[in-house]
Amino acid sequence: MVTSVCWSPDGGRLGSGFLDGTFRVWNVQSRKTILGPINVGQMITSSCYSTDGEMISIQPDKSTIQLWNIQTHQPIGPPLHQEDEDEVSSAVSSRRRRILTCSEDGSIRVWDLESGTQVGDAWKDEGSGVMRTISLSPDGTMVASGSHDGAVRLWDVDTGKVVRKWIGHTRHVWSVCWSPDGGRVASGSMDHTLRVWDVRSRDTIIGPIEATSNMPVLARYSPDGRMIATSGLQLKIWDANTGELLKKIQIKVVCMAWISDGKTLISYGDSGIIRKLDTATWTETARLEGHKGIKDISLSVNERILASVSANQKTARLWDLKNDKLIGPPLYHEGMVRSAVFSEDGKFLATGCDDGRIYTWDVSAIIKEAGLDNLLVSLDASHSQSH
């Protein structure tokens, strides 16, 4: 079974991790294996290309990361492994070619992507307890973290020291999220509350707000920073400046995606119904139905195409988000489909399936066959602008 997929930045290669503990890299055009199988001995839980496409990080367990050089097909240094077996989360600073990890031991560690060695000592703050969430600031100078002691901390990337410590949550901090301008941090906790903190004044400027009644709070800023969405048994939209509840939708939300102009929020839940919400009126503008058992959604880079995958129906579907119509026939798989991701240029879709295979779909060909060549022009323009 496929457990992880990742595209190279140029869209020409696809990395895949498997339940049997092997990892492979495939040439998308030739469909041949160009690296691997690499046998790491354990199920691959996560994988990711570096932004320059020269390295891949493979995470075979919760406390180990191994870097591989794509050109030489050799590992880069020893595995990045914590001495204990505490769970690791990570955030990448591509500007400095370093990776930051946090752990259940309450530490943050910095690793050099070239040598594979730890840089300096572990960052620790006494009494923090388990740390499971970190987020790098938009400018890459600070890291926000959430810990078991209920505190939100800001760390200086250069010194590894805590420069802010916000106390207020009464239970484990589950998620942290930076505002787009880097001036605020939103935090969600297992105490069911949402708080917003001001980076400069060090004050709580919103909250505590009871965002859920029986689930940890996941928070996501809108692209313009004016709203915060929280998921759970209900989708709730909050004014990011006042904390006012703007909208409450009676549906369990598993995942959501903001369109970059902030005018539309796409959400889906257990019902398998994909909804488009107009964020000016918070009314439903479209309901995409007919694809049940949805496990994942993915937006193309130009945000004109949505992919959804269904485990029960063993299919992927493509949707034109401009007219809310399906593009082409269902894309059938031999097993249950669990994940989907577009290539950076939006011209290919990769899906991971329970039959142990990675499926790659030529989105460009599907669009042309459907007579929607205008979407191809938009894809090329978006890819050029992103570089």
Image (cartoon, rainbow, N blue to C red):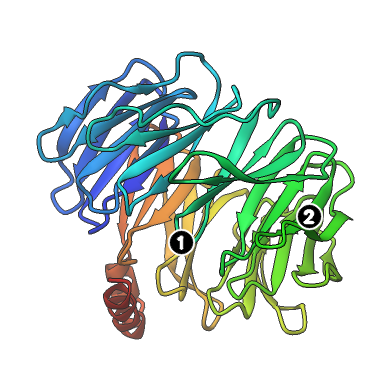
Q: Position of residue 132 (x, y in %)?
A: 61, 34
Give the side of residue 239 with respect to residue 158, left or right. right
Q: Position of residue 227 (x, y in %)?
A: 71, 71
Instruction: Say which quarter of the image contains residue 289.
Output: bottom right
Q: Position of residue 244 (x, y in %)?
A: 86, 70
Label drawn at residue 139? 1
Query: Which class describes the residues within 10 Å of circle 1: few (<14), some (14-19), or many (20+)?
Result: few
Foreground of the two, 340 or 372: 340
381 in relation to 352, above or below: below
* Amino acid marked by disc 2: Arg
234 in relation to 62, above or below: below
Q: Nearer the viewer's eye, disc 2 or disc 1?
A: 1
Q: Position of residue 25 (x, y in %)?
A: 23, 39
Kindly state the secondary structure of the residue where label 2 is placed: strand
Q: How many marks?
A: 2
User: Mark 1 or mark 2, which is nearer the start of the sequence?
Assistant: 1
Quadrant containing the N terminus in the rendered view = top left
Asked if marks 2 and 1 touch (Cβ < 8 Å), the reply is no
* Amino acid marked by disc 1: Asp
What residue do we see at 74% from left, 40% from top? 151
Kindly state the secondary structure of the residue where label 1 is placed: loop
Query: Which class describes the residues within 10 Å of circle 2: few (<14), some (14-19), or many (20+)?
Result: many
Give the side of residue 342 with respect to residue 296, left or right. left
153 in relation to 244, above or below: above
Label drawn at residue 195? 2
